Image (cartoon, grey):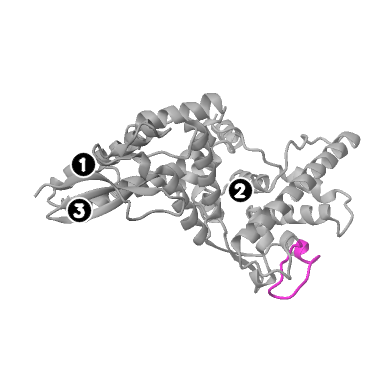
Amino acid sequence: MSATFQIVFRSDKPKKNGECPVYLRITQNRKAKFMSTGISVEPKYWNSDKREIRKSHRNAKTLNQILNLKRTEAEDAYAELARHGRDNSKNIKRKIKAKKDADFFIYAENEIRGKTEIGKLSQVSQTKVAKSQMEDYIGEPLLPIAQMDHHFLEGFQNYLLYQKKNKPTTIKKTFQPIKRIIRQALLDHVIHVDPFVFFKRVKENEPPEKTKLTLEQIDLLKSLDIKKGSSKWHTRNAFLFSFYSAGIRFGDVCELTWDNVKGGRLIYNMGKNGKKFSTHLNDPQKEILSHYSGERNQFIFPFLKNDVKYDDLGDLRRDIRSQNALCNKNLSNLRDLANDKIEKEELKLPYVEHISFHVARHSFAQHAVNNGVSVYELKQVLRHAKIETTEKYLKSLNAEVADKTISKLF
């Protein structure tokens, strides 16, 4: 039996302010289900004959349009369910609710909660940025996922590119959580076509040459006269330790404890991908560690607080970000001191352009390649999941090696 859809005024459910709610009644096989429309008015504004809000109400036109839309949505849901033999009032109600909830911003909030629970805080930050950018683009936090076809995505991409002046690499990162949300919507059968199949992503520029330091520049940093025990001194030690440890990321340096130093080895799990890293301690590493001491569960470098348990990952990441900002200032100061020394002592060294903990990683990679380490060996040391990542990483590093190779052949 076909279903009927009626707008009804529930005078039997008055609110404290005197208004009564308007419901959508779905009836099939003499069974009725009521769905709230979210609209309520005083009894004097309801026309029971026409089943609509009287024109005397100041928002009658808008509210009646919403009521008609609610009824149309229910009729459309019924038609779609009827094709699969599932056209009962309960399923119609569930179908309407599912489509209502299938909003990009609702999915984004679910993504943020889910990634927060499992500690994927970089993805949480990424999703928050994408959510904010999308709201800026459409002007409100309301976007049915069904409307996000490839034309919509290309329009959003053009907005980021030409109005927000985002670089292609930044746009790529913004689209990563959007891809995850679309993938989830496909799994939920909210949509049936992946808009990214037809989406044309803006091409990335060739990666800029990565900043790296030569061994001579590394030695120059070591020779700088820095007050022992100062914040700058600790920052330099941590930077050098990162370089001599295959470019440990700053967050991992912060989290190193004396438990990570066992039997003459450095053993720790990388925070970015959870992969285990284990290697013999070399002499430069040992020399740096000789300046520090502590209990097994205490941090090696004094960036995080030993009296804080850091059970909350959010607190941990916040403190690491704060220390990273401070260390970056110290590294900038060390760069200036190094360049001053080059100039005053007329050293035959190139000026230091930039220093960061990622530069330590780049510098290690370049030094490894210069000394004949293969891309496969380097992949293991850098703990990349794919060889393509290592190859891309080296794309702007090994020009010098290419020059030397060609000069040997010709």
The residue that disc 3 covers is: 89
| Residue at the spot 79% in from the left edge and 36% down from the top edge | 349
Between the residue at mark 2 and the residue at mark 1, the CA separation in whole angstroms equals 67 Å
Mark toward the start of the polypeptide (1 vs 3)? 1
Where 11 sits versus 118, above or below? Answer: above
Where 335 sits versus 165, above or below? Answer: below
User: Label 1 is placed on what type of residue?
Assistant: Glu
Between the residue at mark 2 and the residue at mark 3, the CA separation in whole angstroms equals 68 Å
Judging depth in this view, the residue of 241 and 366 nearest the camera is 241
Residue 393 badge: none
Between the residue at mark 1 and the residue at mark 3, the CA separation in whole angstroms equals 11 Å
**In the rendered view of the protein, which quadrant contains the C terminus?**
top right
| Magenta span includes 305 | no
Q: Horizontal and vertical percent for residue 116?
A: 52, 57
Assess disc 1: are there few (<14), some (14-19) or many (≥20) residues with their C-alpha within 10 Å of its C-alpha: some
Q: Quadrant of residue 166?
A: top right
The residue that disc 1 covers is: 75
User: Label 2 is placed on what type of residue?
Assistant: Ala
Q: Is 97 left or right of 123, judged from the image as shown?
A: left
Secondary structure type for disc 1? helix
Q: Horizontal and vertical percent for residue 288?
A: 77, 61
Q: Quadrant of residue 311?
A: bottom right
Comparing labels 2 and 3, the label whose residue is closer to the camera: 3
| Magenta span includes 300 | yes
Tell me if label 2 and label 3 are in contact, CB under 8 Å: no
Q: Is 391 left or right of 191, judged from the image as shown?
A: right
Tell me if label 2 and label 1 are in contact, CB under 8 Å: no
Instruction: State which region is magenta.
Output: 287-302
Judging depth in this view, the residue of 351 and 326 nearest the camera is 326
User: Label 3 is placed on what type of residue?
Assistant: Ser
The residue that disc 2 covers is: 368
Assess disc 2: are there few (<14), some (14-19) or many (≥20) residues with their C-alpha within 10 Å of its C-alpha: some
